[in-house]
Image (cartoon, rainbow, N blue to C red):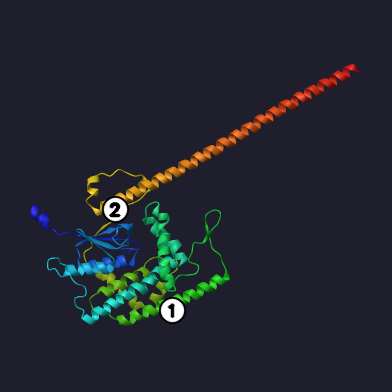
């Protein structure tokens, strides 16, 4: 019984952004990593949804843990799983084993091109277009994140994408938070010049997107997958990006219209990948923990001795310390505001009381003067 427990293989754990819109994640590289593991080590990994990239070795999702090993970024994950495939006991398979050396070189180049060019189009749809960001991306990410991260992390991620999109010519001129009125509602300016600028930008983006999509449509050449009837890493890369242009309910469906109207083979290729992956027994998913206002209240660690042994526990301890600090600052700020408000109310009341008292004294003095005048007039009338 003991030996069986010792020899039981350790499952790999893939940490990714949570699922939405019937897709396994909101991030293309997370979807690519999951598809790759499903095709290479089915049944030998589990998925843990994560909303805190800081727990990753690189500060980005996805990342994979296996025992004491932790690898981040999709190329590193693919390399790690490929090394497992060389072991006869791991049960992993090399997704690109049938490719020749020239085909492997070609695959590597095209994967980089997908991540750079189609990745830019995905980022454009999620972060550059104002309607898409404020009506879909921001609310979706805010619903996943805990308090207070939900109020600033989506905007911070948007700003992280901005330099890349500006360099690619995909950052729209109107891609900024609209002005707010006195009630906090966003107001849009209907300037004809802005309308012309947006129309010109959409034409430019459409031409750029069609240029990239045309390359892959020609490379696919009406085949089911790029290198035949079996999917490879390149198929995984492209399908994970195309699905995020097709399935999310964007208010502005520019990319989806271009794909469905002009590139049906790329749409079908992405659906073929979905079908291929869905036919394999599914993995276990641990959803991201639900967060509420109660999560702001710090709780004591239940097992401090474990914290010294595990890096994950150390990260959890750091997060809890930061939460303590945030809670203390928030409480202190509220307390200071309450004290200042109380002092102002006390001063105003004291001034009002003094004003009423002074007004009462003046009234008494006027009454006395009036009485004396009346008495003097009465005396004069008597003398007459």
Nearer to the camera, 1 or 279 = 1
Q: Residue at x 65, y 29 (%)?
A: 357
**First along the sequence among labels 2 and 1:** 1
Q: Residue at x 24, y 49 (%)?
A: 307
Direction right: furthest residue: 384
Q: Where is residue 333 in the image (x, y as percent from the top left)?
A: 45, 44
Instruction: Say which mark, if any, is on residue 207.
Output: 1
Q: Position of residue 285 (x, y in %)?
A: 26, 58
Report the side of 85 relative to 24 (left or right): left
- Quadrant into which the C terminus falls: top right
Q: Position of residue 297 (x, y in %)?
A: 36, 44
Residue 332 position by quadrant = top left
Nearer to the camera, 368 or 90 = 368
**Label 1: element kind:** helix
For label 2, count other residues whose C-alpha is less than 10 Å away and answer few (under 14), some (14-19) or many (20+): some
**Label 2: element kind:** helix
Residue 214 position by quadrant = bottom left
Can you identify the residue that label 2 sits on? 315
For label 1, count other residues whose C-alpha is less than 10 Å away and answer few (under 14), some (14-19) or many (20+): few
Q: Nearer the viewer, mark 2 or mark 1?
A: 2
């Amino acid at each position: 019984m003991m030996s069986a427990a010792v020899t039981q293989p350790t499952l790999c754990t893939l940490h990714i952004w949570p699922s939405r819109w019937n897709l396994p994640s909101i991030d293309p590289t997370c979807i690519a990593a999951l598809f790759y593991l499903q095709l290479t080590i089915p049944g030998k990994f589990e998925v843990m949804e994560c909303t805190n990239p800081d727990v990753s070795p690189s500060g980005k999702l996805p990342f994979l843990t296996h025992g004491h090993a932790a690898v981040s970024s999709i190329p590193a994950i693919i390399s790690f799983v490929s090394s497992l495939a060389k072991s006869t006991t791991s049960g992993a398979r090399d997704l690109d084993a049938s490719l020749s050396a020239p085909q492997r070189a070609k695959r590597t180049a095209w994967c980089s091109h997908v991540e750079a060019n189609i990745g830019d189009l995905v980022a454009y749809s999620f972060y550059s277009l104002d309607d898409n960001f404020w009506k879909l991306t921001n609310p979706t990410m805010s619903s996943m994140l805990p308090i207070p991260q939900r109020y600033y992390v989506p905007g911070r991620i948007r700003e992280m994408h901005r330099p890349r999109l500006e360099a690619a010519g995909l950052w729209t001129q109107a891609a900024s938070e609209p002005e707010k009125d006195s009630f906090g509602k966003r107001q849009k300016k209907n300037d004809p010049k802005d309308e012309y600028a947006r129309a010109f930008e959409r034409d430019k983006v459409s031409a750029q997107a069609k240029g990239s999509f045309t390359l892959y449509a020609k490379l696919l050449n009406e085949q089911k997958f790029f290198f035949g009837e079996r999917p490879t890493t390149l198929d995984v890369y492209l399908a994970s990006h195309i699905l995020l242009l097709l399935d999310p309910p964007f208010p502005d469906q520019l990319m989806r219209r271009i794909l469905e109207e002009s590139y049906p083979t790329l749409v079908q290729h992405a659906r073929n990948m979905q079908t291929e992956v869905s036919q394999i027994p599914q993995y276990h998913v641990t959803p991201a923990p639900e967060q509420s206002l109660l999560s702001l209240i710090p709780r004591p660690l239940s097992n401090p001795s474990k914290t010294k042994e595990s890096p994950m526990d150390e990260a959890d301890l750091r997060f809890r310390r930061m939460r303590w600090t945030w809670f203390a600052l928030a409480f202190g700020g509220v307390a200071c505001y309450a004290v200042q408000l109380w002092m102002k109310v006390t001063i105003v009341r004291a001034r009002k009381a003094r004003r009423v008292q002074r007004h009462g004294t003046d009234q008494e003095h006027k009454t006395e003067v009036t009485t004396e005048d009346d008495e003097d007039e009465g005396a004069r009338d008597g003398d007459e």
